[in-house]
Image (spheres, rainbow, N blue to C red):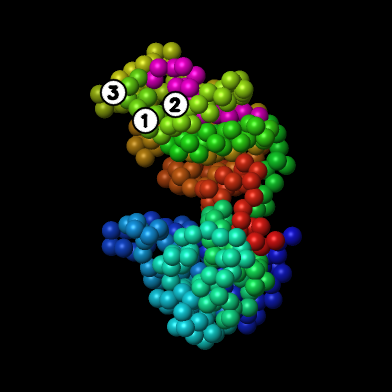
Amino acid sequence: MIRTLDDLDADGVAVGVRVDINSPIGPDGTLADDARLRAHRDTLAELADRGARVAVLAHQGRPGGDDFTTLESHAARFDDLLPAPVEYVDATFCAAARERVDALDPGTVLVLENTRFYSEEVLQFPPETAAETYLVRGLVPVLDAYVNDAFATAHRSQPSMVGFPVDLPGYAGRVMERELDALGNIEETPEPRVYCLGGAKVDDSIEVAASVLDSGLADAVLTSGVVGNSFLHASGVDLGAESTRVVNDRAGDRLAQAERLLSAYGDRIHRPVDVAVERDGERVEVPVSDLPVEEAAMDVGSGTVDAYGDVLADAGTAILNGPAGVYEDDRFAAGTCDLFEAATAAGYTIVGGGDTAAAIRRLGLDGFDHVSTGGGAALALLTGQSLPAVEALR
């Protein structure tokens, strides 16, 4: 059993709240998109309203990356979004941070500095080991409870994700609770269950296809994007030099696995029947029977969308992971837009977070039953795996 905020007597309690506000950063080094902050607004506002003294733990970027920066602008945005006063301290677990947490008034929020400024946080440990890191040991003495709302990071066994529940009572925040309710029992969702796998992360998608087909979770897999091109290539289709180069770069040694899957589940793995390319600056749709062509495949064609739409119309559950093409270019957004809209005809439709959620925001699509805030974490649950941070809360 996992406790939620409903089980927490928050009045006057010092609560460490792990959120995932890892966001795009602008050229000036400040926050460029607040979608992930808005996702956690309910959890933080509820705790503050109930009189908790809230210390926010979060990361931004990875060491060495252009988006690896402080949380000062995140704190300023939270101050705009939340009805409670929000403070910021450029420390995470040292004496200065502990003093600020200890001095918090009920109903006040304090954003601590980027957890990944400390090397322990980029490593993964079992919970008992994570509880002995400086980050966790430094903050536990000034906290009474721990709330994990960072679903998007729940697949990582990092100190701030799994260490605190060893020594503090742990609770799921509202984002975590919603995600687990929607994704935590994927095997119980209505059948037939159809997975739409697209995007450019081909190795991950082939692993997902293998997992859901081998386990019996998927009744059908619809492939698109570079994933679809990879399965076409694995089935013996000559795509042309440019598309083949992209497939080899992205899929690598996973192509042998794609061939195995086609041999075992050929009729359940649907491949594109046409692709769209750029020719003389225009979108041109090419039937697979007319391949190879010189140009790279940039999207699926309307014939593919029609064929996939027929499968989705009969689906009990549709799971979307990855766009169908280069949707950022308006000429090649139609496949993603039309395919995702077709998926809403299924009995229950799940958007698997990450790039998929970004695509539906950019394209202005709606009508989905659940849009996840997580990419890797959502995929883990959608393939029947457990999440370290969730297990730590148990």
Pick the front one: 292 or 302: 292
Q: CA distance from mark 2 to mark 1?
A: 9 Å
Whether tag 1 and tag 3 are in contact, CB under 8 A, the answer is no
Quadrant in which the N terminus appears: bottom right
Binning the other alpha carbons within 10 Å of mark 3 as few (below 14), some (14 to 19) or many (20 upward) gives few
Instruction: Relative to 213, say whether 143 is above or below.
Output: below
Instruction: Relative to 267, say whether 168 is above or below.
Output: below
Instruction: Relative to 364, say whether 26 is above or below.
Output: below
Whether tag 2 and tag 1 are in contact, CB under 8 A, the answer is yes
Q: Can I make out residue 171 in this image? A: yes
Instruction: Relative to 86, say whether 26 is above or below.
Output: above
Quadrant in which the C terminus appears: bottom right
> Quick check: 332 left or right of 28?
right
Q: Which mark is residue 246?
A: 1
In the image, the segment drawn in magenta is: 219-239
Where on the picture, by quarter, is residue 262? Answer: top right
Which of the two discs, 3 and 2, sits closer to the camera? Answer: 2
The residue at 56%/60% (across/down) is 125
The residue at 52%/77% (across/down) is 138
Secondary structure, mark 1, is: helix
Binning the other alpha carbons within 10 Å of mark 2 as few (below 14), some (14 to 19) or many (20 upward) gives many
Badge 1 amino acid: Val
Pick the front one: 128 or 151: 128
Whether tag 3 and tag 2 are in contact, CB under 8 A, the answer is no
Q: Can I make out residue 40 in this image? A: no
Secondary structure, mark 2, is: helix
Q: Which mark is residue 144?
A: none
Pick the front one: 3 or 384: 384
> Quick check: 198 left or right of 293?
right
Circle 2 residue: 229
Q: Is residue 266 magenta?
A: no
Circle 3 residue: 279
